[in-house]
Image (tube, rainbow, N blue to C red):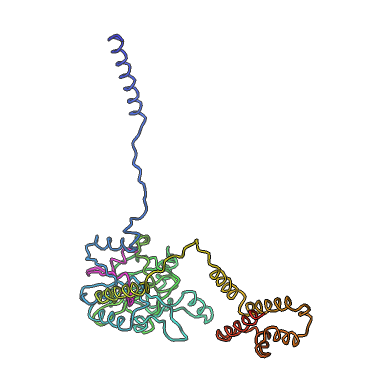
Amino acid sequence: MKRSNLILLLVLGALFLGGVGYYLYRNLEPYTETVEHGPSPEARANSYLAAEMYLRGRGLKVTTASGIEVLDKLPALGQTLILLGTRENLTPTQNSRLLDWANRGGHLIVTAENLWDEKEGKSGDLLLDQLGVQQFLTEDLNKDEDKDGGKTEAEASDEQGDEPASAPEAQEQHPDQPSSASDDAEEKEPYPQLTKLYLENEKAPAYIDFDTDYHLFDSKNLAYAWANSADSTHLLQLEHGQGLITVLTDNWIWQNRQLEDYDNAWLLWYLTQDSAVTLVKRADSDSLFGLLARYFPQALAAAVLLLILVLWRSGLRQGPLQPNPDRSRRQLEEHLRAGADFILRQRGQLALLQGLQRDVMRRARQRQPGFDRLPVAEQWQALGRMTRLSASAISQAMRPHPQKRMAVAEFTRQVAHLQSLRNAL
């Protein structure tokens, strides 16, 4: 190819690439696309990871614990302890430790787990039963209201004031009867299914997404602050000694997916402000194996090793292995013994005895024609003449046998009598 043609081709190629680049520059627009990969493995493993990060972002010191054993090293003053796990298996001693910790100045936040049983007079929640906090279903309160024509407990608490004060003096400001202005405000309430938390010097309340199916009742009238929805109470605060106890109907509002809804995150900060926070993810007591593994790991390891040695010792063979029999051997005695053992297992002792008796009768017919037409007594007499055996021996050998299983010694004697009678014919 000539040099001039090569240069022309290069120029045309450069013009083509330039045109394509100019077209793409004029028509293509860059954009940003966000690909959602779902929660991280840490968030899937920890339902309250967002709550931990939120509190740390507000400047609070947050630690997590797997059980209430954290009370051994946790000071009371300036501390907030939030029990996120179930308290179903807590012992009375552990519940007393929680109350004592709060009495010394700590802030304990717990969730009501059981419903109040009117018949038994308790709920089974040892901690809340001592505090006089009872949990009911909201629908049950509505049923009682329909029957009695009165007001529910939630409405009674509303009459005392919807403002769950953050300070004791706010309770003194609650009127016995709500004013007409508050009634008008309640009628215009934009979120009747949400729980309202009123604060002093605040015009609008905070809204929290509690489960409205449950209601808390302060049977001992110890609560100095509370938060209500339209029909029920979902937050109670009680002074306990030098400390504070906050009772909630549910704590799922602080899980990863619900924390950002409404003022759920703000409530978490409001209850824990100006304190160090400890989140207990599993408040129930440890199992026996867990306690042994924690406090006696050496003893547990020794017990496991001993069990392995016992199993290994019991699995040893008792004596040397027997060699495998030669497949080429053909001994008649082994075949006969195997056949007799098979019949004994499948058909029982009676089949073997009847087989020997039939063999005796067959040999007797061969020696004396017409033997099978004789009566039984004459047959036994004929057998005595042929074999020169006593009548008692003939009778013992040829008599019918019961269906029940015979003893080994008796069965062996009977077989010996029949074999002697057969051999004598």
**Nearer the observer, 341 or 166:** 341
Residue 270 located within the stretch drawn in magenta: yes
The answer to whether 272 is drawn above or below residue 10 in the figure is below
Q: Is residue 107 left or right of residue 115?
A: left
Q: Position of residue 422 (x, y in %)?
A: 65, 79
**Nearer the observer, 196 or 105:** 105
The answer to whether 121 is drawn above or below residue 35 in the figure is below
Quarter that holds the C terminus: bottom right
What is the span of residues highlighted in magenta in the rendered image? 263-290
Q: Position of residue 94 (x, y in %)?
A: 30, 81
Quarter that holds the N terminus: top left
Q: Position of residue 277 (x, y in %)?
A: 25, 69
Q: Is residue 102 left or right of residue 23?
A: left
The residue drawn where x is 24% and y is 75% is 298
Asked whether the viewer can see residue 235, the reply is: no
The residue drawn where x is 46% and y is 84% is 118
**Nearer the observer, 412 or 162:** 412
Q: Position of residue 16 (x, y in %)?
A: 34, 20
The residue drawn where x is 76% and y is 79% is 372
Asked whether the viewer can see residue 317, the reply is: yes
The answer to whether 413 is drawn above or below residue 232 in the figure is below
Residue 123 located within the stretch drawn in magenta: no
Q: Is residue 221 left or right of residue 138?
A: left
Number of labels in the image equals 0
Q: Is residue 158 left or right of residue 244?
A: right
Identify the image quadrant of residue 184: bottom left
Identify the image quadrant of residue 102: bottom left
